[in-house]
Image: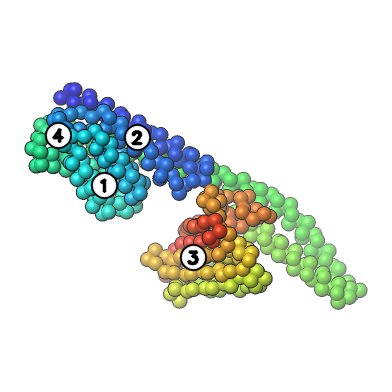
Amino acid sequence: MDVLTKDLLVNFLLMILPLLFIQIVYFYSYHNRLQNKEGRLAAIFPAISILLCLSFPFTINEGFLWDLRAVPIVLGTLYGGYPMGIFLTIVALIIRALLGGDGVLISTITLLLIWILYFIFMKRFQRSHIPGKILIGTSLVSFLVICNLALSYFIFDVLMPIDVWITFTIINVTGLVIALILWEIIRTNFLILNDLIRAEKMSVVSHLAASISHEVRNPLTVCRGFIQMALQDGRADQNQRYYLDTAIKEIDHATDIINDYLTFAKPATEQYTVIHIHDEITHSVKVLQPLANMNTVHISVKNHLHNDAMLKAERKQFQQCLINIFKNGIEAMSDGGTLTITLSQHLLGCTITVEDEGYGMTEEEVNRLGEPYFSTKEKGTGLGLMVSYSIVKAIGGSIKVFSSKNQGTRFEITLPVHRE
């Protein structure tokens, strides 16, 4: 029994060790803006755990290998999704087949049977908090262990002693709990670090915007005052008055932009009002229609919202958020095309989908959207989308971007619908 426990604990160490290096994947994916590929990269480490567990098993009956491979298989599938699960299952089956013995048949049956439970519990696992994840994970590992033991007895009449059975099950469950907690700690630490870096960038931009806006607004105010004095001079002819009026309008426009950036840097929730989503979409489209005509872009709006679908937000901010995103889509189609805006309703709120036919972006560029001073446009600053992301987040929404090079870009803006 002591020898068995020692073998299982060595197996436990070999199973845990590769999982500790998953944080390398998160840092690498963040550094190279490969967040959507981190699941594929993370699959390497559970596969290594499976290999190590199968390389150092303990045996009671010849042809049957007992180890902790169930833990990395289950955890890797639950966290990585179906593609990683298929990969880990194939890896486990190939390695086990190479080792040979009657246990190959048992492993194949159990690893295929558990896919029924994956389909049932996968989405529930990914939505659950840590206690729920532990419950689902331990249930699946226990299923694999008990299924292995039961099939070994019924098919090959191989009976494991009850004390060995209990020890084997307990160490498998304990190993899963510890591995799951470690994985959660690594993921949480990475997400916190990611948020801190983004918050630091936003803080720097906010301070910069505040200081520059203050300095720029003062001379604009002075210029506006002198222009107004010039307008009051009766000697100005009609052309001069037109030029001066135009100058005042542009100065007011510049002042509004400066004030908006100051507001966007720190949205004021006390100014929120209830607005109709479709009305704001219509207004934003009308504002950008001249730009669309100039770029030979057709704007198509498909409204599937209820007529009374409303949002609690600051009207001017929300309009500017939409204008920034719509404008980017129009400018991305230098050779013309169609900007499709689709409004759809769902249980938790509504989604505004903005799809263009422009030059698209690489995955790295998509993952950097919303960062200050990052832009795919030659003369862009990236502040427009940064502002849009900030506004949507402040009103409880989210933005997802899907794009491929030369295949257009799709923005999905999910917003909470206000209910009386």
Q: Quadrant of residue 181?
A: top left
Q: Residues within 10 Å of mark 3 (few under 14, many from 20)?
A: many
Q: Examine the rendering and report whether any part of residue 235 can be seen.
A: yes
- What coloring was used for the rendering? rainbow
Residue at 73% over, 57% down: 217
Pointer 1: what residue? 136
Q: Earlier in the sequence, mark 1 or mark 2?
A: 2
Q: Secondary structure at mark 2?
A: helix
Disc nearer the start of the sequence (3/2): 2
Identify residue type, mark 4: Trp
Residue 185 in percent (x, y) is at 39, 39
CA gap between label 2 and label 4 equals: 25 Å
Q: Measured along the vertical axis of the image, is residue 169 above or below residue 82?
A: above
Please give the name of the residue rendered at 33% of the width and 44% of the height, measured from the top-left corner.
87
Residue assigned mark 3: 353
Locate residue 21 relative to residue 277 in the image: left or right.
Answer: left
Which mark is first along the chain, 4 or 2? Answer: 2
Residue behind mark 4: 165
Mark 1 vs mark 4, CA separation in Å: 21 Å
| Residue depth check, mark 2 versus mark 4: number of the one nearer the observer | 2
Q: Which residue is disc 2 drawn over? A: 48
Under mark 3, the amino acid is Thr
Residue at (86%, 77%) from the top-left corner?
238
Secondary-structure class at tag 1: helix
